Image (cartoon, rainbow, N blue to C red):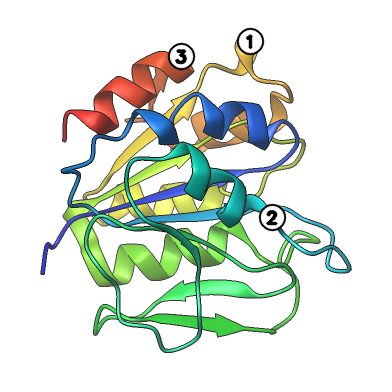
């Protein structure tokens, strides 16, 4: 089991941003990827289906108590926080919304930082609030890396800018640079 993982958070404009990154992960990619996208709680998410058709590695909606498989992309289901457990399994929670969001990017990033420490890379993409900034800081404090979409090129710049503001070591990149960085891991 790899002691590396990638967590990605996105909100407004997420579909376009993720489309520029996820299909470029190669078929032999072995690192698990966990993704929170803010979706209204009353909506069914089609993200896993949509990206399963575009990606070269398995894509699924996360299930509670599911063991983490290498080289798999996991999307948080609508209206549930996605947590990474230290035993390298996933958990779903219907705890209170964080920054008006469930699933919360911060909850995913913070729990994954506990599980993976310096082996974690957090990616903050487009979004219209500050979710993900505190989680990015936790990842940075645990020794992990933080990549942030260039706010000027994001559909909504608030979320990437909030992460940059709290993470001294955040690497600000274009979507293409993020895709290449992850694919080369």
Q: Tag 2's secondary structure?
A: loop
Which residue carries the number 2 mark? 46
In which quadrant of the rendered view does residue 72 lie?
A: bottom left
Indicate which label's residue lies in the foreground, 3 or 1.
Answer: 3
Q: Are marks 1 and 2 in contact (CB under 8 Å)?
A: no
Q: Which mark is residue 152?
A: 1
| Tag of residue 108 | none
Image spot of residue 166 (x, y percent): 50, 38
Q: Residue furthest front?
A: 53
Horizontally, is 72 left or right of 116 in the view? right
Q: CA distance from mark 3 to mark 1?
A: 10 Å
What SS does tag 1 mark? helix
Identify the residue position indicated by label 3 in the image. Answer: 174
Confirm or deny contact between disc 3 and disc 1 (CB under 8 A).
no
Identify the residue at horizontal 53%, vertical 36% (top origin).
163
Query: Which callout, 3 or 2, points to the residue nearer the camera?
Result: 2
Total marks in image: 3
The residue nearer to you, when weighing 87 against 167, is: 87
127 to the left or right of 24? right
Q: Residue at x 41, y 71 (%)?
A: 111
Q: CA distance from mark 3 to mark 2?
A: 25 Å
- Label 3 element class: loop
Tell which circle, 1 or 2, labels the residue nearer the N-terminal end: 2
Of circles 1 and 2, the one toward us is 2
Q: Is residue 166 above or below residue 115?
A: above
């Amino acid at each position: 089991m790899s002691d590396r993982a990638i967590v990605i958070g996105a909100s407004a404009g997420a579909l376009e941003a993720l489309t520029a990154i996820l299909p470029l992960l190669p078929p032999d990619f072995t690192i698990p990827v966990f993704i929170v996208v803010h979706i209204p709680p009353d909506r069914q998410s089609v993200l896993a289906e949509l990206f399963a058709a575009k990606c070269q590695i398995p894509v699924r909606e996360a299930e509670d108590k599911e063991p983490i498989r290498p080289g798999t992309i996991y999307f948080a289901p609508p209206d549930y926080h996605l947590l990474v457990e230290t035993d390298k399994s996933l958990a779903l929670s219907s705890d209170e919304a964080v920054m008006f969001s469930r699933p919360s990017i911060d909850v995913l990033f913070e729990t994954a930082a506990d599980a993976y420490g310096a082996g974690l890379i957090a990616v903050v993409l487009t979004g219209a609030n500050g979710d993900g900034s505190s989680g990015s800081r936790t990842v940075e404090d645990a020794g992990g890396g933080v990549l942030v979409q260039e706010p000027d090129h994001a559909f909504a710049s608030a979320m990437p800018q909030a992460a940059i503001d709290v993470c001294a070591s955040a690497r600000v990149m274009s979507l293409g640079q993020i895709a290449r960085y992850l694919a080369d891991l």
